[in-house]
Image (tube, rainbow, N blue to C red):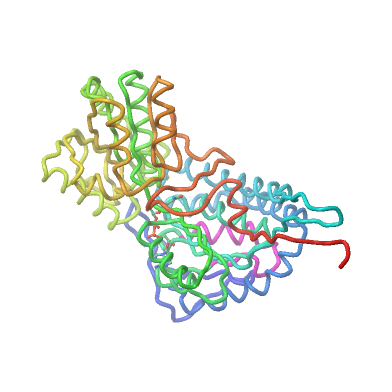
Amino acid sequence: MLSHWIENGAVAEAGAVGIEVLDPASEERLETMPEGVAMVDAAVASARRAQPRWGSLSPTQRKDLLLDAAVHLEGHADPIIDAFVAENGKPRREAAAEVRFAAGVLRSFAELAVHARTGVQGAAAGNLVFQHRVPRGVCACIVPWNFPIAIAMENLAPNLAMGNTVVLKPSEKTPMATRLLVEAAFGHLPPGVVNVLLGSGPTGAALVGHYDVDLVVFVGSERTGRSIGGVCGPLLRKVVLELGGKDPLIVDETVDLGAAARLAAATTYANAGQICTSTERIYVQRSVFEQFVEEMERVSAAQRIGPGRDPATTMGPLIDELQLEKVASQVEDAVKLGAELHCGGYRLDRRGYFYPPTILTGVTDGMLLMQEETFGPIAPLIPFDDFEEALALANASRYGLAAIVCTTSPLRAMAAIERLEAGMVKINTTRGKAEGGTSEPFKSSGIGHGYGMEILGEVTRQKSIHWRSQL
Ligand code: NAD
C-alpha cells in the first residue's frame, strides 16, 4: 500500500481502508492507497510546525532550495513518468512533457517570488505608508487526475516560493506519480514544508475543514468546488476554486476550414477530451457547415487510440469506468433525442476505458451533452447564421472557463474578446495558459486566480503599514 509523506518521511497507515489504483488502459490493479482521514491532523500539524521557519527564510534562500528541487525532479523523471502513464493512461511523450513543464513552473515561481514587489503610497513628510506581504500559513492543495503533475506543481510552487507550507492531496485516481515526485523533488526541504496526504473525497473534506488550515487551493469539478466553498464560507477561510467548463468554439465562414477542423480536433480530443478547457461545443457558420463536418470526420479518423505506453498512440483511454459511463450516457441521451452520429459513439471492444472520437450533429440545447461538462472526446457541431447568434449561443452555459473563436475578422475577434463570458478567450489558437498568463473564471467555473503571477497575491496577505518617524 502507498504511504503518506509527512515530515519528510513515508508514513504507512496500518489498518486504513485501501483504495485501488487502476491502470485505465488494462483495468488492472496497480496499487492500493489509504483513505487518510485519520492522518489529516498529523499532516496539518507537520505543515504548521514547519511554516514559521520556512516563511522567515529570505525569498532568495527559498528560491535556491526550489531551484535544486527542479534539478532533483528532472533527475528522477523516468520513474515518475512511468507511474504517471500507468495510472493516468496518457501518451508517454505527453506525460514526459508535463514533468518538464512542472520543473519549469517550479523555476518560474522560485524566481518570480524574489521579484514580487509591494507598493508604497505617497504620505506626508516624516510618514511612510507601504504594503507588506506575508505568507498565509498552511495551504491545503487538492488536485485532480487529468494533469496530476502539472496542476500539483502549479499549486505547490507559488505557495512554497511565497513562504507557505503545504498539505497536498492528490486525486485517488493518480496518487503514484505525485507521491514519487514529492519525495524526489522536495526531500531536501526542511521537514514538513511539503506533505502528501493520500485519500479520496472524505480525506479532502476533512482537510478543507481542518481548524488549522489557512488557505485552500482547489482544482477539480464544479460539484466538489461547491462543496468546498460551502465548508470554507462559514469558516471565513480563503479559497481559490478552479473548476470545470463547457468551452465553446466558434468557426465563421471566413477561415480555412481544414485548419479550423485541425484546431477543433486538437482541442476536443487532446487528453481524450479530459481537459478543463477542452472544446465541448462547436458552433459553425451555416454556409460552411457541411464542409466543416467533412473536415472534422477526416481529422478525427487520424487519431490513434491505445495505451499511453505505445509510442503510436495519440489518444489514450478515459480515466475510469465512471467517466466512460458518463460520456457514453451523454451521447446515448443525445442520439435518443434526435442527434445524428457521424463517427464514434460506442465503447471500444477491448479491455480498458477506450472511447473513440465522436462527432454529432442535430444536437439541441436541451440535451445533457450541451448542458453538463462531458470530459470526453465528443464533438457536437451546431450551425449558426450570424456572429451575434454565435456569441449568444456560446454564452448560453452556466460555465465560463475558456472559449475559442476562428475568424479572420478583427471586428468579430474584438467582439468576442469583449463579450464572451469566459476567463480565457483564444482567437485562432488552442493555446490556453501561456507562461505568466492568468484569468479569473466566469460563472460556475470558479473563483480567484489559480494560475499566473496573480496567484502570488492569492497565497499571501498584504498588510498596510502606517509608520511615522516619531510619536
Ligand atoms: P473531483 O472534484 O472529483 O476531484 C478533485 C479532487 O477533489 C480529488 O483530489 C478528490 O479526491 C477531491 N475531493 C473529492 N470530494 C471532495 C470533497 N468533498 N472535499 C474535498 N476534496 C474532495 O474532480 P476530478 O474528477 O478529479 O477532476 C476533473 C474536474 O476537474 C473536471 O471538472 C475539470 O474540468 C476540473 N479541472 C479544472 C481545472 C481548472 O484549472 N479549472 C483544471 C483541471 C481539471
Task: Check the image and name the residue furthest to the right.
Answer: 470
x, y (%) of residue 250?
Answer: 33, 31
x, y (%) of residue 243?
Answer: 41, 53
Image region (quadrant) for ligand 1: bottom left
Q: Residue at x 27, y 50 (%)?
A: 372
x, y (%) of residue 161?
Answer: 67, 55
Q: Is residue 110 left or right of residue 211?
A: right
x, y (%) of residue 346?
Answer: 19, 44
Front residue of this view, candidates 409 and 39: 409
Q: Residue at x 72, y 49 (%)?
A: 117
Q: Residue at x 52, y 49 (%)?
A: 150
Image quadrant assignment for residue 260: top left
Front residue of this view, candidates 350 and 459: 459
Image quadrant assignment for residue 46: bottom right
Front residue of this view, candidates 440 and 434: 440
Residue 281 in the image: above or below residue 18: above
Magenta-tinted stretch: 175-196
In magenta segment, residue 231: no
Image quadrant assignment for residue 460: bottom right
Q: Is residue 121 left or right of residue 203?
A: right
Circle count: 0
Task: Check the image and name the residue furthest to the front.
Answer: 124
Q: Residue at x 43, y 64 (%)?
A: 229
Task: Check the image and name the residue furthest to the bottom.
Answer: 15
Residue 41 in the image: above or below residue 24: below
* Quarter of the picture holding the C terminus: bottom right
